[in-house]
Image (cartoon, coloured by chain):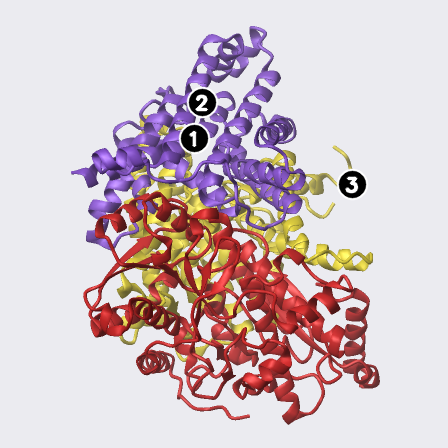
């Protein structure tokens, strides 16, 4: 039983890590209808810039964070201006492809600037079991994962407040609903998009720091996008809540499946199980759990 | 890539003239060069591994030119083509490099099992030897079936049996392994499947329990695997990973409280690329290696003096790392094969066929290693038609948190068993492909 | 001036409905085929044939496959590489396990197997649309290579999981030189492209396009959605499967399941986007562009930098190439979101009027 609980808790916490990446996708999709595949590259770029700055000038954590945030906001705004604005009103697939091109671009630039060497990212937080829980319940809960989960929780709360309570947030939801109507009532569309891309850059930075501290800052960070995709389908592309709930479901389910089902089929099923699960959910709800329902009219 | 354009175009022009008029042969004779084609990769998920390996490779070639003026007066030139670890691009690079110069690209180090497979059938037709140090087809050790492929030093099965031997030594003898529990944590791909038959055979022979746990590509999330390990409580974990999977395995081992001193990696899971990314979590971890790490070798000092001293070097931070040393060793074997071939065929640029003979008749004993400045970095290597590996041994290092420390002598596991399995597998390939096993001679 | 259809009168429906109704187009096509079948094998070097033309043709076929599904039937898929893998492995197994199996028979059976698998993974399309479907096809992309690695029977129990393909032998004719391989691949691709073009002009093709443009409306006018979508998946996967078999047999000679990864799927998707969604010519143009661009960039960056006396440090050229590739993709999408095929069309319209502006 305690093993089951361990797997479940581990899975839920891992799921939060997926949600973090998925959040960046959701933000952009919500506001501009772009499925931004470059989010993985942005995570990589953010982590690399952070460690690169730290290494080059021996900066303290917070200063490196602020500087990187500045860079990411710059990247976000530049992306919006150079890549997406000229492509407004193009079919989704074209936009999607453009973001893949963008991913190549960012990956190349990141490595040109900072090199291919793998760096370690030290947040001063070791990835160790929490001893108190270990002793009392014989349960393994990672300190690092718990902190990551708290960070993700805080981030979601902040974003939720931002979207629901502030003026910009309301404008943003209007934009998400209908670009043209929003424009017609005088919402500055371009500014809103710039803000969203900047926020996505911020989310990428947070995800990059947490994932980078876990796996080392290396090219493989771009692969975290693949972990986020099933979360997105399951939760729905437009829902922040969906990203979190989806992450929890995917994380827990894939770990449990790997441990309890994997042994019967030779293991290693995590790679596709999440997608299969998401697909199953989609068959029941084709817009994801929290996605917006679309009605087709002829 | 680093060859001066001028020199290259001169050679090309001279070559063209030689074909057209058959007159300009003097120009070629004045500046004989041995062209080495390099299919490398420096971008993508394995870019860091490639940068270190090919960095060392090219630094050594530079050393030969700068210090010795080439091989017996034949200067080395080279071109690096980016494969991105992608098979289609690898084939394109191979095709591009193969006809660049009349004598061919000397020998190709694909540094990727996939690319090795993709050009395996092409190499004999084009008469280009492939050197696959520690990867590629294990059964290519049998040179009667694979005359053009050289898994120099050791192959995967030598690695796997070597690891078992190492664990046995740590436990105090092979008989102590009985009843012990081992986990093979492997990259779920062709690469990760490679050691399974020998590991199973070893388990049966020595009586240890073996559990094999796959990690799906890319392996950046291993919670469930390590919880399984935690539940199984093995005595040792053998790590058979590549890329981000290694660092994540070390991190997750720490997270689940598994001692790193009980983890042994294979030689693709044991470089600074892996341990530095994992940080303190990697301290105490053992890994196999083909070439020892460190700078305490005359050849490294020479490279720092002749290559970096004349600012012809690559990334100085990589000097002396595991993969850099391995790349340098790979270059050394290539150069020595050319030298060996020159003994037989004359001091001029060697063709693929001649280089092949050279690789098949390498004899780099301890004395030769010393005079080359490698000392004990590598084991002695003696190749033959039946043994394209030439060493079959591995050595183990332990990560101290800042550097790799030697943790064992050169050792081999059950060589007889590996040899038997290599021959079986090679024979199967030969029947499938209709090859009549035979030694090629010269 | 030369490209004008004035004076070409159609006197029957048949002539009006032929593939190339304009005489100049027919001539151009004949010339193109003559060049491809005769001039190229005579002139191209082995490097061009093996490293560029054969991969180009193979990918064109895969791009046609994806274009049928995405461009004509409107179902987005990110799993093309997986269907290629099915085709490759199935063809290998038919060839290895059925005694006396002709090679082309293996290719066809490989394609049919891929078609079957494609239909299976196409089933969710009956309920899921758009991007959700695209991400759902990733299930195929990750599941199939996993299965191929797991079940060693597929690779004839080779320890490495790689399949080493049989020689290309058709009725006693062994295609082993680059030229012969090229001709074999070219023939297969040309025939299949012709079939695809005709299929698109048939009732099936029109049904696909109706579903693409609006499936609810298509249903209302009496098109059977289930059948239409699933045939699109089947035909598309068949093409991808044969392309996969060609990739294994004629390009690489030996493949591992992980060669058919997500990157390859993306590359094929790139080909149809850059080439032109819903265009046969676009499949070829896109494949040419995506195959040639990196090589051209590589040569340009390394040799170009060397020519102006600038020795790039190792690795920089590779990364710069990635940057330029990404930037060019974005640039093309911005300049011509409908792909190269659209540029081609504009060019044709201009040629029609030339030398007059209107």
| Tag 2 and tag 3 share a subunit | no
Q: Chain of mark 1?
A: A
- Residue at 76% over, 58% down: C311
Q: Can the viewer see residue C184?
A: no
Q: Can the viewer see residue B131?
A: yes
Q: Residue C82: give x, y in percent of width and height.
A: 38, 52
Q: Residue B328: give x, y in percent of width and height.
A: 60, 70
- Marks 2 and 3, how far apart in space? 63 Å
Name above or below for residue C13 compared with residue B271. above
- In the rendered picture, chain C carries what hue? yellow
- Residue at 56% over, 25% down: A197
Q: Quadrant of residue B267?
A: bottom left
Quadrant for the N terminus of chain B in the image = bottom right
Q: Secondary structure at mark 1?
A: helix
- Marks 1 and 2, how far apart in space? 9 Å
**Mark 3: few/some/many CA within 10 Å (<14, 14-19, 20+):** few
- In the rendered picture, chain B carries what hue? red
Q: Quadrant of residue A125?
A: top left
- Residue at 29% over, 32% down: A249
- In the rendered picture, chain A carries what hue? purple
Q: Secondary structure at mark 3?
A: loop
Residue under label 3? C355
| Tag 3 and tag 1 share a subunit | no
Q: Chain of mark 2?
A: A
Q: Chain of mark 3?
A: C
- Marks 3 and 1, how far apart in space? 59 Å
Residue under label 1? A20
Q: Are marks 1 and 2 in contact (CB under 8 Å)?
A: yes
Left or right of residue B121, residue B423 in this image: left
């Amino acid at each position: 039983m305690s093993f089951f609980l361990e797997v479940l808790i581990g899975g839920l916490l891992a799921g939060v890590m997926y949600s973090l990446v998925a959040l960046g996708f959701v933000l952009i999709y919500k506001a501009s209808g772009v499925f931004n595949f470059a989010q993985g590259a942005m995570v990589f770029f953010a982590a690399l810039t952070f460690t690169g700055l730290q290494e080059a000038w021996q900066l303290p954590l917070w200063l490196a964070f602020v500087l990187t945030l500045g860079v990411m906001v710059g990247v976000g705004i530049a992306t919006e201006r150079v890549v997406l604005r000229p492509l407004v009103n193009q079919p989704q697939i074209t936009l999607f492809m453009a973001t893949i091109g963008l991913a190549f671009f960012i990956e190349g630039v990141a490595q040109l600037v900072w090199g291919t060497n793998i760096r370690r990212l030290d947040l001063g937080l070791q990835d160790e079991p929490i001893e108190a829980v270990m002793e009392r319940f014989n349960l393994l809960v990672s300190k690092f994962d718990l902190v990551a989960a708290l960070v993700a929780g805080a981030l979601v709360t902040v974003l939720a407040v931002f979207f629901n309570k502030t003026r910009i947030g309301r404008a943003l939801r209007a934009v998400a609903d209908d670009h043209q109507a929003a424009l017609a009532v005088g919402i500055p569309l371009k500014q809103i998009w710039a803000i969203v891309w900047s926020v996505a850059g911020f989310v990428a930075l947070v995800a990059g720091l947490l994932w980078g501290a876990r796996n080392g800052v290396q090219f493989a960070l771009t692969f975290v996008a693949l972990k986020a995709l099933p979360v997105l389908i399951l939760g729905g592309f437009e829902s922040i809540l969906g990203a979190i709930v989806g992450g929890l479901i995917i994380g827990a389910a894939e770990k449990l499946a790997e441990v309890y089902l994997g042994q019967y089929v030779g293991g290693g099923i995590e790679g596709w199980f999440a997608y299969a699960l998401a697909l199953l959910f989609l068959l029941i709800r084709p817009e994801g759990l929290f996605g917006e329902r679309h009605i087709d009219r002829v | 890539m680093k060859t001066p354009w001028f020199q290259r175009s001169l050679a090309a022009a001279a070559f063209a003239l030689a074909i057209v008029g058959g007159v300009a042969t003097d120009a070629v004779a004045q500046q004989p060069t041995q062209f080495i084609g390099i299919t490398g990769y420096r971008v993508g998920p394995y870019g860091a591994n490639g940068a270190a390996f090919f960095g060392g490779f090219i630094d050594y070639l530079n050393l030969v030119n700068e210090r010795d003026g080439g091989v017996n007066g034949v200067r080395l030139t080279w071109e690096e083509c980016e494969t991105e670890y992608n098979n289609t691009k690898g084939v394109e690079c191979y095709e591009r490099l193969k006809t660049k110069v009349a004598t061919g690209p000397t020998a190709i180090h694909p540094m990727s099992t996939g690319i090795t497979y993709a050009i395996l059938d092409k190499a004999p037709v084009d008469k280009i030897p492939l050197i696959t140090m520690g990867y590629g087809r294990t059964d290519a050790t049998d040179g009667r079936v694979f005359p053009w492929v050289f898994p120099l030093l050791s192959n995967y099965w030598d690695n796997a049996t070597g690891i078992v031997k190492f664990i046995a030594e740590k436990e105090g003898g092979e008989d102590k392994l009985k009843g012990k529990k081992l986990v093979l944590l492997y990259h779920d791909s062709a690469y990760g499947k490679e050691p399974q038959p020998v590991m199973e055979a070893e388990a049966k022979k020595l009586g240890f329990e073996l559990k094999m746990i796959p990690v799906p590509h890319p392996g950046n999330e291993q919670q469930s695997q390590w919880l399984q390990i935690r539940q199984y409580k093995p005595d040792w974990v053998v790590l058979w990973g590549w890329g981000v999977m290694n660092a994540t395995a070390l991190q997750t081992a720490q997270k689940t409280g598994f001692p790193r001193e009980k983890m042994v990696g294979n030689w693709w899971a044991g470089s600074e690329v892996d341990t530095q990314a994992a940080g303190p979590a990697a301290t105490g971890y053992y890994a196999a290696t083909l070439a020892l790490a460190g700078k305490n070798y005359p050849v490294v000092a020479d490279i720092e003096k002749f290559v970096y001293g004349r600012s012809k070097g690559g990334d100085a931070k990589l000097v002396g790392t595991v993969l850099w040393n391995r790349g340098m060793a790979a270059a050394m074997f290539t150069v020595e094969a050319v030298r060996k071939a020159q003994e037989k065929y004359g001091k001029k640029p060697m063709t693929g066929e001649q280089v092949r003979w050279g690789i098949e008749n390498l004899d780099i004993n301890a004395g030769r290693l010393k005079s080359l400045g490698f000392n004990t970095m590598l084991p002695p290597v003696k190749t033959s038609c039946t043994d394209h590996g030439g060493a079959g041994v591995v050595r183990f290092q332990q990560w101290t948190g800042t550097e790799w420390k030697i943790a064992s002598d050169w050792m081999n596991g059950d060589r007889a068993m590996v040899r038997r399995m290599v021959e079986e597998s090679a024979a199967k390939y030969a029947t499938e492909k209709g090859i009549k096993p035979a030694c090629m001679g010269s | 001036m030369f490209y004008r259809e004035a004076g070409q009168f159609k006197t029957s429906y048949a002539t009006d409905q032929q593939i190339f109704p304009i005489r100049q187009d027919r001539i151009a096509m004949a010339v193109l085929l003559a060049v491809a079948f005769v001039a190229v094998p005579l002139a191209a070097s082995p490097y061009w044939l093996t490293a560029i033309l054969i991969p180009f043709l193979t990918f064109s076929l895969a791009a046609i496959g994806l274009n049928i599904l995405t461009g004509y039937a409107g179902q987005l898929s990110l799993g093309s590489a997986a269907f290629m893998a099915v085709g490759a492995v199935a063809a290998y197994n038919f060839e290895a396990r059925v005694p006396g199996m002709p090679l082309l028979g293996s290719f066809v059976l490989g394609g049919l197997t891929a078609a079957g698998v494609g239909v299976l993974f196409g089933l969710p399309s009956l309920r899921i649309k758009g991007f959700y479907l695209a991400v759902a096809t990733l299930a195929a992309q990750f599941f199939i290579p996993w299965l191929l690695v797991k079940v060693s029977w597929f690779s004839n129990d080779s320890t490495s999981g790689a399949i080493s393909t049989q020689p290309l032998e058709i009725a006693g004719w062994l295609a082993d030189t680059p030229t012969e391989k090229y001709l074999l691949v070219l023939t297969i691709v040309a025939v299949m492209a012709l079939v695809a073009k005709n299929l698109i002009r048939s009732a099936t093709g029109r049904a696909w396009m109706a579903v693409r443009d609006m499936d609810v409306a298509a249903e209302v006018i009496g098109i059977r959605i289930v059948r239409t979508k699933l045939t699109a998946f089947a035909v598309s996967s068949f093409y991808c499967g044969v392309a996969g078999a060609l990739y294994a047999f004629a390009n690489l000679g030996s493949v591992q399941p992980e060669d058919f990864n997500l990157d390859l799927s993306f590359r094929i998707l790139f080909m149809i986007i850059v080439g032109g969604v819903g265009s046969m010519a676009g499949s070829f143009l896109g494949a040419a562009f995506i195959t040639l661009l990196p090589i051209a960039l590589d040569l340009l960056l390394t040799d170009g930098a060397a020519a102006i006396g600038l020795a790039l440090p190792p690795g920089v050229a590779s990364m710069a190439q990635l940057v330029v590739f990404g930037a060019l993709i974005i640039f093309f999408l911005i300049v011509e979101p409908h792909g190269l095929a659209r540029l081609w069309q504009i060019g044709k319209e201009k040629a029609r009027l030339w030398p007059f502006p209107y």
